[in-house]
Amino acid sequence: MGCETGAMEITEADAQLLNAVQWSFPLDAAPYAVLADRLGLIEDEVIDRLRAVKAEGVLRQLSAIFDTRALGYTSALIAAKVDADHVDAAAEIINEHPGVSHNYKRNHDYNLWYTLAVPPGEDFDAHLDVLHQASGARVTRKLPTLKLYKIGVKLDMTGQTAADAKAEVLEHERPERKADMPAPVLSDLEVRVIQLCQDDLPLEPRPFAIQAEKLGISEDELLAILHSFTDRKLMRRFAAVMNHRTAGFKANAMGVWAVPEEDLEQIGPQMAEFAAVSHCYRRPTYDDWPYTVFTMVHGRSARDCEATIDAIATETGVDEYTLLWSIKEYKKVRLRYFTSEWAQWNDRNLAPTAS
């Protein structure tokens, strides 16, 4: 089958390849050759196809995906109530923070939703207070992860996954998340590897050799460090990230569920098993926010998202829930670690005594 994505038709071979680079990219000296063997292609064809989908904006990035908390960063989802005529301006202010990677307007009284992370040793609440005050939000709620049931966006480019389909939640999709995770001890070289490997992997036959040369180390040394990051659970995986809309997934919805406390450990994992659910978390409640479990769902249409949410409700029996739609995307980038942007933002916005 093929699906129209802008000016480019995604063929069945493209779809299988894009699934492979999202789900199981090989940490190997010649990763594209390994993929070619796996898919019955040749190495040059794999590289050419990936270049084509990258040029068309379907493939956003192919890189290491690090675990924010495991690296010692503090992070949380933030919900804010902002006057309707001020939302765009508030989002622009919030987007200036280097720890804001996602920022959306949604159809709720809490109409601005963003993720915020701050580096090890910094005061998360001080950063959040600056954003609250500067944005002019009437109310700002911090919604950190209390329990992670699943994290991992995998868009089935073949279009063959049903709305109620299930998929095993893999180990890297449920990494350990604690409220306070100490920063790991990293060598200067390891920090430089993180700084480099959070960027796009070259689409060349020996991509890690190219990166290793930039670091002044051997290809084997770089691969060993990346494997060690996986073993230490600092890196969740090495994988491709898609541009959802360009890839044909034009709808995304956040289903929030009022799951009773006594049912969380059964229902949270149950919701995470739905293949269309990319993120599933337990988060805190407030007087005006009774929802304990959050599920992110991506679909080719709003109807696809609704079908998955209906399937979750039917299977779990949870009938108190709300579906929040993404109305406007203000920011969607990969969080960048150990960059100079943090110090620059601090200098402009925090008191001189802040680290």
Image (cartoon, rainbow, N blue to C red):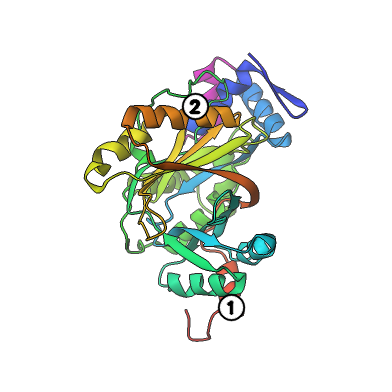
Q: Secondary structure at mark 2?
A: helix
Kind of residue at disc 2: Ala
Residue 218: % across, % down: 50, 47
Which residue is depicted at the point 49% across and 21% down?
161
Please indicate whether residue 216 sits to the left or right of residue 120 in the image: right
Residue 212 visible in this rendered orientation of the protein: yes
Give the residue at mark 2.
307
Please indicate whether residue 327 sits to the left or right of residue 71 in the image: right
**Rendered-image quadrant of the N terminus:** top right
17 shown above or below 114:
above
Label 2 environment density (alpha carbons within 10 Å; few <14, some 14–19, many ≥20): some
Closer to us: 329 or 180? 329
Residue 81: % across, % down: 55, 62
Label 1 environment density (alpha carbons within 10 Å; few <14, some 14–19, many ≥20): some
Residue 44: % across, % down: 65, 24
Q: Which residues are magenta?
A: 26-41
Between label 2 and label 1, give the one nearer the viewer.
Answer: 2
Q: Secondary structure at mark 1?
A: helix
Which residue is depicted at the point 39% across and 31% down?
312
Query: Quarter-wise, where is residue 242 in the image?
Result: top right
Q: Which mark is residue 113?
A: none
Residue 155 visible in this rendered orientation of the protein: no
Q: Which mark is residue 349?
A: 1
Kind of residue at disc 1: Asn
Which residue is depicted at the point 38% across and 39% down?
173
Q: Are marks 2 and 1 in contact (CB under 8 Å)?
A: no
Residue 119: % across, % down: 46, 66
Could you tell which of marks 2 and 1 lies nearer the N-terminus? 2
The span from disc 2 to disc 1 (Cα, nearest Å) is: 44 Å
